[in-house]
Image (spheres, rainbow, N blue to C red):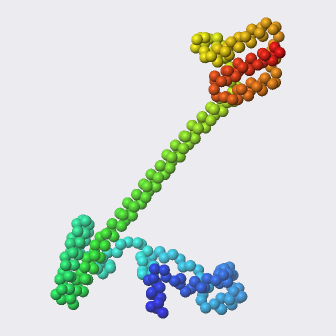
Amino acid sequence: MEEASAQQQGAAFPAPPYYFQRYTQENLNLLEKARGDPENPEITKSLEALSFPILALEPPPPVKKGAYWMFGRAWPIQDSLATLEEQGIEQLYPKGSIDRVKELKKLNHSAVFNFLELVHTLSTSPSEFATKVDQIRVIFINMHHILNEYRPHQARETLRLMMEDQLNRKKKETAALKKTCADLRKQLAALRVLKQERSQPPRFDVDVEMAQAPTSGLSQSHTSIATASTIATTTSSTAGTKPLRRPSGSEEKRKSMLELTPLDPIAIKNAETLARMMDLCDDIE
């Protein structure tokens, strides 16, 4: 039984302790009742029927001093690196402050030398190999102990690198968010300008521009439109001084012409001139 328990304690995935079966819902309810009214005779009778004290279900307080047991080994509360003397191992390098790199090189040379002696011992007197094997074991334990003294420094450096990497990653993410926000602001500003341009009615100064522009620079279409506009104006002046009316039908035609190419200024001017001519023709008829 003890051997099986020792094997379970040293296993990588040990089985749960035997007393986990005590934590039933009935026993937990009984524990709550015992805390509230320990003098109740019914509760006392139920507690006497149990094979273990009900207070054993409460978790023990955390260990603050000494050591605790885990996987069959005692671990000190204050985590610290035990010295070789405390472990019962001979220390092969000097005590106090040392040059760890230099001592590791010396121990490495000693390990190689003892390995060669082990090979020689196996060829000459194989029965004495245990001594050399133990010497090599002590050398490697000393090397591991020196390396373990670097662990606190390694932990600090690892933590520093992790924090720097996290900080750099957050900086990159922040820069990407700022760039995205700036692009969105530019797009929103462009959309506002476009909306304002489309919401404002177009301004048509066809007659003024055509009067100011030289005749030689007009294209054939512009010349014909200007001539037609002049004829329409002359006709309206000879017809009388009454204001011209714009029927609803011509207004729809004018809008349909303007909607064809709303962003082309030349097309807008041409459409406006044609719409005015159509209004004049309708009034004359």
Q: Please state the horizontal and vertical placement of residue 65, each as a whole percent of the image.
A: 45, 76
Whether residue 181 sits left or right of residue 113 in the image: it is: right
101 w.r.t. 24: above or below: above
Which residue does the image show at 56% across and 79% down from the upper left? Answer: 59
120 w.r.t. 188: above or below: below
The residue nearer to you, when weighing 117 against 54, is 117
The part of the image, by quadrant, that contains residue 152 is bottom left
Which residue does the image show at 76% across and 19% down from the upper left? Answer: 278
Asked whether residue 96 appears in the rendered view, the answer is: yes
The residue nearer to you, when weighing 57 against 255, is 255
Which residue does the image show at 60% across and 85% down from the upper left? Answer: 22
Whether residue 281 sits left or right of residue 7 in the image: it is: right
Q: Please state the horizontal and vertical placement of residue 86, each as a whole percent of the image.
A: 32, 78
Which residue does the image show at 83% across and 15% down from the upper left? Answer: 285
The residue nearer to you, when weighing 258 against 143, is 258
The part of the image, by quadrant, that contains residue 134 is bottom left
Whether residue 214 sits left or right of residue 239 in the image: it is: left
Of all residues, the one furthest to the left in this rendering is 124
Asked whether residue 94 appears in the rendered view, the answer is: no
Q: Please state the horizontal and vertical placement of residue 7, each as a whole percent of the image.
A: 45, 87
187 w.r.t. 106: above or below: above
Total numbered badges shown on the rendered structure: 0
Q: Please state the horizontal and vertical placement of residue 147, each as a whole percent of the image.
A: 31, 69
The residue nearer to you, when weighing 267 against 129, is 267
101 w.r.t. 278: above or below: below
